[in-house]
Each structure stands twice: as structure tokens, then as C-alpha cells.
Amino acid sequence: MFTASRMLLLLLITAMILGSCEGDTGTAAHAASVSITDRWHFRKYLEDPQIPEKAKQVFNDQRRLEDAELPFYISHLQSSNQEEHAFYFRVITNSYNKKGIRVPEGLANAAYRYVMNNPAEFADYFAGPDAFTDADLTTWSDLVIVELERMTEDQYGRPVIETYLDSLEGNCHNANAQQQRILRRFGRHLTEGWQRYLMNVEQ
């Protein structure tokens, strides 16, 4: 029989469990946003006390990066520790995945160089389990386009898209077939975005 004493014991246990959850510092909340497979080792970085709390907040879409913070995140995206690239790639993506957000010149240039110099790594984020979304791919094409706009300096007839895509192709000799398909899709995003930009300029 389910007695009153057993009911009281159950209530006490429930209260203890809920209390322990409320006392968490937020690390568990951060880690809860990670998929079960955790292909990119996000949980490792979200639970690491050495990783800035602000980075974890951006990861979880709780805030956006400030311009003064960008050099730190760009340096980690380009570091020799390749494993950490995916975490900082996600942080940067989350900060600029909305239309109308001003893109600092330094970030646009960094995005331009990162994709061009690491096409296989870049494409791999959009393949397989835990892949980034096509919307994220568009975010990065938009970042690159900002740098291309700066480079043209009103010389809109320059074949900047073609030149950039040629550079990508030249640097992706180690990309597999799936990654090459993703890079072609990225190229279509770039081409379409650049055409929209030119149409707006001509109006």
C-alpha cells in the first residue's frame, strides 16, 4: 500500500533532486544543448572553466559577440589546435546568423581567408552527423561577400566571385566528394548573394 510516509519520502526525494538542479552553475544548461553524438566535442568546451562564459552564452544564442571580442575568437578559429575550430566556428556563426547585423571589416576579412585557406575543413562542418545548417552556410557566404564588397571598391565589373571560387578549388585538393559538393553549394550561395548585391548597387 502506498502509505502517507512513503508519499512524504517521495516528496522529499523530489525536492532534493529539484534543489540540486537549481543549484547548478549553468554548465549543465550549456551542455544540454549539445547533441548526443557530439561530433565536434562541444561538451568538452562548454564544461571547460577556462573557456569564457561569454563564449558559452553566444554558443547558446544568449548574446552576440562585441567587436572588441572578435580578435580573440578569430585567433582561436585559426589556431593550430584544429579540434577547437568547430566550437569557435559555431560561436562566430551564432553571432552573425541574422540579417541586418553589421559585419566588422576584420571579421569579414577573417571569414574570407578562413574559407579560402581551409575549404575542406569548412565544408566538413556541413556534412555528416551534427552538420551545420544550410542557413549557416548562407551566413558564411554573406560574411565573405562583405569582404568582396570592400575589395571591389566600386569596381563592380571585377570577376571577384570567379577568382575566389578558383582559389577555393585550388585549395581543396584534399576534399572528398561530399565536401566538394558542399563547396559547390557554397559557391552558388556566393554567386546569388553577389548578384543581389549588384542589383541593389545599380538601383
Image (cartoon, rainbow, N blue to C red):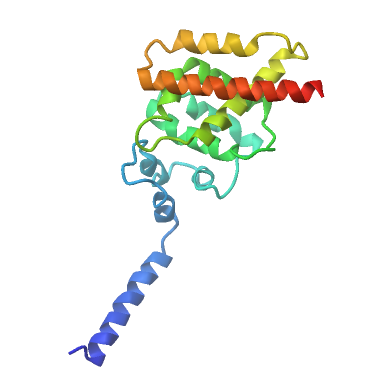
Measured as percent of width and height from the top left, residue 99 is found at 66, 38
Measured as percent of width and height from the top left, residue 107 is found at 61, 27
1 up-or-down from 93: above or below: below
At 44% across and 58% down in the image, what residue appears? 25
State the residue in front, 69 or 132.
132
37 up-or-down from 157: above or below: below
Furthest toward the right, the residue is: 203
Tell me where residue 155 sits by quadrant.
top right
Judged left or right of residue 1, residue 104 is: right
Judged left or right of residue 148, residue 125 is: left
At 56% across and 31% down in the image, what residue appears? 138
The reply to whether residue 109 is in sight is no
**How many marks do you count on the picture?**
0
Measured as percent of width and height from the top left, residue 4 is found at 26, 92
The reply to whether residue 9 is in sight is yes
Split into 4 quadrants, where in the image is the C terminus? top right
State the residue in front, 151 or 131.
131
At 39% across and 50% down in the image, what residue appears? 31
At 29% across and 76% down in the image, what residue appears? 13
Measured as percent of width and height from the top left, residue 51 is found at 46, 41
State the residue in front, 56 or 37.
37
Split into 4 quadrants, where in the image is the N terminus? bottom left
Furthest toward the bottom, the residue is: 4
State the residue in front, 176 or 105.
176
